Amino acid sequence: MSLYRDDGIVLRTHKLGEADRIVTVLTRRTGKIRGVAKGVRRTMSRFGARLEPFTHVDLQLHTGRTLDVITQAETIRPYGEALVTDYPRYTAGSAMLETADRLTLGEKEPSLRQFLLLVGGLRTLGSGEHEPRLVLDAYFLRSLAVAGYAPALEACARCKAPAVRAFAIVAGGVVCGGCRPAGAAVPAGETLALMVALLKGDWLTADASDGRHRAECSGLVAAYLQWHLEHGIRSLRHVEREPAT
């Protein structure tokens, strides 16, 4: 029996048999793992409440044939406590967890930067310092960048020309007039500036942005993310967008 320890964020859970649960966790060192938590659905479970989505936990597991088995779980920080009573923040957090799960495809492949981004995103979301959708869009852009899909935002994605005219998902970001494909969106300059600010962590600029530019930014970021994932993010249908004004 091979024992190991790691800490991570619980991404999702689902039932197994009558009393067990399979828990998917994005960990600091090991990457994404799926572990069986035996008996956690019983009322007398030792650590059932510690293995809920949004929780940062310290785990001890032993390696199994198909799924590892969780033998110990200690809460480091329950990020969900700050989110469950606030619908916009809870739904934004749910979209973060789902995106982290989608972007870390392989199990037990170290993904430290994705882990740190998720922890930082949940911490910022729970603090209430910034509008939830801004935090979510910043997380989307940065996690895409870590995965190698950062959109071009300041020069043409195809020819590197500085004069940009449109945003084309299939081209990889902003494009100039000569490289613009059919159907490309033409966002406001302020919207592109907001995307740059979110990617760079310039919260002073992001917090001062106008509602209509936030809404346009959210639409572009969500479309770009889901195109690269080749799969929709189900949680996004519940996320509240900043209303246009």
Image (spheres, helix red, strand yellow):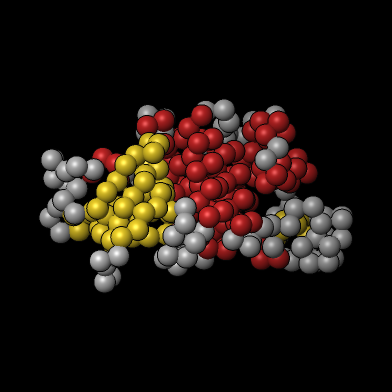
The residue positioned 30% from the left and 65% from the top of the image is 2
Residue 201 in picture, x, y percent from top left: 67, 40
Q: How many marks?
A: 0
- Kindly tell me whether residue 183 is visible in this rendering: no
203 or 49, which is in the foreground? Answer: 49
Q: Residue at x 67, y 34 (%)?
A: 203
- The residue located at (25%, 59%) in the rendering is 69
Q: Is residue 5 left or right of residue 176?
A: left
- The residue lying at 61 percent from left, 44 percent from top is 138
In this view, 27 is above or below 46: below
- Residue 218: x and y, percent? 60, 45
Outermost residue, right side: 162
Q: 167 and 58: which one is in front?
A: 58
Residue 188's place in the image compared with 38, above or below, is above
Quarter of the image containing the C terminus?
top right
Pinpoint residue 56: horizontal percent, then vertical percent: 40, 43
* Depth order, front residue of 60/16: 60
Quadrant showing the N terminus? bottom left
Question: Is residue 187 something one can see in this rendering?
Answer: yes
Q: Is residue 133 left or right of residue 167?
A: left
